[in-house]
C-alpha cells in the first residue's frame, strides 16, 4: 500500500529539515541531507511524469502549483483536529436486520 503523496512530501520535508539541523552541527552526517534532496528530486520527477502522461496541459500544471497550499491546509487541519476523549461507537444493526424486522427470519 502506498501513502498519499501529501504524506510522502511531509516526510521528505521533515527529513530535509531534520537533516539540515543536524548537519549544521555534525558535518559527517551530510549524506542524510543528500538523501532528502534525492527523495525530493525523485518525487518531483514522479509528479511531472504523471502530469506529462495525463495530457491535461498547462491548466494541470497550474493546478499542481497549488499543491503546497493544499499541503499547508492539511497540516493545519491535522494540528487543529479536536481530540475526542469519550468516543462511543454508534449502534450498528445486524446484517439480517430487515429479515428480523419483517418477520422473515
Image (spheres, helix red, strand yellow):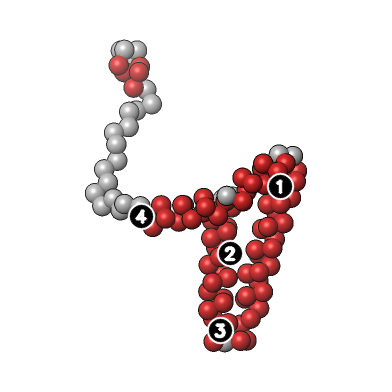
**N-terminal label among 1 and 3:** 3
The CA distance from mark 3 to mark 2 is: 18 Å
The CA distance from mark 1 to mark 4 is: 32 Å
Is residue 3 at all visible to an observer of this figure? no
Residue 6 pos. (x, y %):
55, 53
Q: Please name whichever residue, 14 or 61, is drawn nearer the observer in this view of the structure.
A: 61
Choose mark 4 or mark 2, whichever is in front: 4
Q: Which residue is mark 3?
A: 24
The crowding category of the residue bearing disc 2, from other C-alpha atoms within 10 Å (few below 14, some 14 to 19, many at least 20), is some
Identified at 58% across, 70% down, the residue is: 16
The crowding category of the residue bearing disc 1, from other C-alpha atoms within 10 Å (few below 14, some 14 to 19, many at least 20), is few
The secondary element bearing badge 4 is classed as helix
Residue 70 pos. (x, y %):
51, 50
The CA distance from mark 2 to mark 1 is: 19 Å
Q: Which residue is mark 1?
A: 50
- Compared across the picture, whether 14 is left or right of 36 comes to left
**N-terminal label among 3 and 4:** 3
**N-terminal label among 3 and 2:** 2
| Quadrant where the C terminus is found in the figure | top left
The CA distance from mark 4 to mark 2 is: 22 Å
The crowding category of the residue bearing disc 4, from other C-alpha atoms within 10 Å (few below 14, some 14 to 19, many at least 20), is few
Q: Which residue is mark 2?
A: 12
Q: Which residue is mark 4?
A: 80
Amino acid at each position: 500500500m502506498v501513502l498519499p503523496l501529501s504524506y510522502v512530501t511531509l516526510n521528505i520535508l521533515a527529513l530535509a529539515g531534520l537533516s539540515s539541523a543536524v548537519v549544521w552541527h555534525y558535518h559527517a552526517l551530510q549524506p542524510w541531507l543528500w538523501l532528502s534532496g534525492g527523495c525530493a528530486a525523485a518525487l518531483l520527477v514522479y509528479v511531472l511524469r504523471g502530469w506529462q502522461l495525463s495530457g491535461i496541459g498547462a491548466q494541470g500544471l497550474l493546478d499542481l502549483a497549488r499543491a503546497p497550499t493544499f499541503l499547508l491546509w492539511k497540516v493545519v487541519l491535522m494540528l487543529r483536529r479536536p481530540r475526542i476523549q469519550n468516543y462511543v461507537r454508534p449502534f450498528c444493526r445486524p446484517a439480517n436486520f430487515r429479515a428480523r424486522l419483517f418477520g422473515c427470519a
